[in-house]
Amino acid sequence: MATPSASEKSVAPIVVPGQLTLRTIRGKNGPFTVGRLTTHLGVFEVKDPELEQYPEGKYDGEFVIRYIFPRSYPVGGGMRFEIRASLDGMTLSGIDKLSRDEARSFATQEVDPLDEEQGTQPAATPVKPAKASRPAKPAPVQASADPLIDTTPFGVDSPTSTAAAVSGSAEDGDAALFGLLWPLGESVKLDSTIDRRALRAQIARLGDLGYALDFKTQEWSHQAELQPA
C-alpha cells in the first residue's frame, strides 16, 4: 500500500463537510467496503479500515481529512489511478440508500483493500493428507438401567461435559478475537487500527452475538431480544 511522505503526514488535519458514499462489494475474501468522499475540495476515494463497520449507503457529516495522496495499482490488464483521502475521524448525521446508478458508479473490478495491504498472493493449492488407516471401532457400551451407575467409558466425555467444553471453547475464541475488549459490554467501540482481517472477524462476530452499529455514536450496541406478544 502506498505510504504518504513525511511532508504529507506533517500537515495538520482539516475538517470539511461532505458526503461519504459507501459501497459493499463481495470478493474472494468476503464482503469489503470502499468509499467515495465528496467535498468542496474535490472527490476522493476512501479505503480506510474504519469503513468496514458501516452498511452501504450515503452518509452526510463532517470529516477530518488527515492527508490526501495519489494511488495507482494494477487492475486486469492495465493500471488504475485515483486520489485518496485518509480520514482521522468523522461525525455522521444522516444516511440514505444508494440508487442503482450510484452503486454502478463504483468500478466493477474494485480491489479489496486487504489484498492491497498484504500484496496479492496466489491461492495456495490445498495438500490432501495421506489417508491413515482407520482404528477399529470400539464395541458399543451398554448403558446400565441403574441411574446411579456411570457406564461412560474412561476417556469419553459425557454429553453434558462435551457441551460445556464447546461453550468454553467459544468463549476462549471470543476472548482471543476481541482481546482487551473482552468481556463485551452492552456497547462496544472497535479499534480500526488493528489488522484489517481481524477487524472484519470482530465485525462479523458482533453481528452473530446480536450487536448492531449506531453510525452516529460509532459504537456497537447489544440489541434487546423481542418479547413475545
Image (cartoon, grey):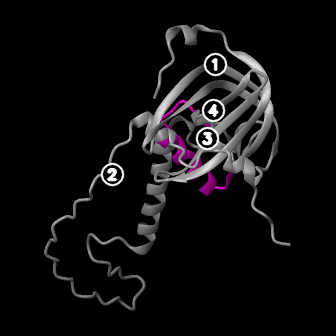
Residue drawn 32% across the image and 82% down it: 151
- Quadrant of the snapshot with the N terminus: top left
In the figure, residue 9 lies in which quadrant? Answer: top right
Q: Earlier in the sequence, mark 4 or mark 2?
A: 4
Q: Which residues are magenta?
A: 190-212
Residue drawn 21% across the image and 83% down it: 138
How far is disc 3 from disc 1 in space, using C-alphas? 18 Å
Query: Do callouts 1 and 4 mark residues in contact (Cβ within 8 Å)?
Result: no
Q: Earlier in the sequence, mark 3 or mark 1?
A: 3
- The type of residue carrying mark 1 is Arg
In this orientation, which residue lies closer to the viewer: 171 or 124? 124
- Foreground disc of the pair 3, 4: 4
How far is disc 2 from disc 3 in space, using C-alphas? 23 Å
The residue to which callout 2 is attached is 123
- Foreground disc of the pair 1, 4: 4
- The type of residue carrying mark 3 is Val
The residue to which callout 3 is attached is 34
Instruction: Say above or below: 68 vs 118.
Output: above
Residue 139 drawn at (x, y percent)? 22, 87
Give left or right: position of 76 versus 23: left
Query: Do callouts 3 and 4 mark residues in contact (Cβ within 8 Å)?
Result: yes
Q: For numbered disc 1, what is the local secondary structure?
A: strand
- The type of residue carrying mark 4 is Glu
- Quadrant of the snapshot with the C terminus: bottom right
Checking the image for residue 92, the label placed there is: none
How far is disc 1 from disc 4 in space, using C-alphas? 13 Å
The residue to which callout 4 is attached is 45
Residue 101 drawn at (x, y percent)? 74, 50
In this orientation, which residue lies closer to the viewer: 153 or 128? 128
Give left or right: position of 115 versus 178: left
